[in-house]
Amino acid sequence: MSNIRNFLILSTSHVKQETAEELDCAEYYSGNSSVLAGGPFSEYGWFMYAQDCNPDGKVPSELMDVFAYANAHDCDYVLFDRDAEVIEELPTWEWS
């Protein structure tokens, strides 16, 4: 196993607004209720592990789609950044 990992950088517009609001809460990543491995990336997005399973169904589907895309491109992590580019193969959502 290599100590070097790749990560995908993409726009926060690939996340629904309601999911983004959950991702901004530190409780979402802590304790036994943790659904995702990762957390906020300053005030501009999130950095998280691109998990390949969703056994309890708690990870939002748009995140699982992004994780599948990342894994297909040999990326272990995803950095959602508000200033990053949109990836045409993935859906986007408008925020209010």
Image (cartoon, rainbow, N blue to C red):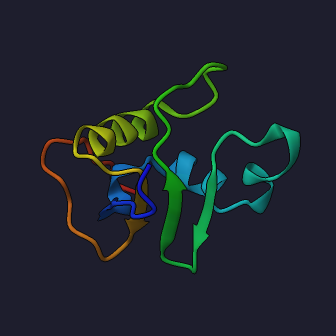
- Relative vertical location of residue 41 with respect to residue 64 in this rendering, above or below: below
Quadrant containing the C terminus in the rendered view: bottom left
> Residue drawn at (37%, 72%), measured in percent from left and top?
82
Q: Position of residue 50 (x, y in %)?
A: 45, 45
> Residue drawn at (39%, 64%), measured in percent from left and top?
4
Q: Position of residue 62 (x, y in %)?
A: 40, 37
- Of 60 and 66, nearer the camera is 66
- Of 49 and 92, nearer the camera is 49
> Residue drawn at (31%, 45%), measured in percent from left and top?
70
Residue 19 visible somewhere in the drawing: yes
Residue 96 visible somewhere in the drawing: no
Q: Position of residue 30 (x, y in %)?
A: 81, 53
Left or right of 56? Residue 60 is left
- Of 88 and 72, nearer the camera is 72
- Relative vertical location of residue 20 with respect to residue 18 in this rendering, above or below: below
Residue at the extreme front of the image, as rendered: 1
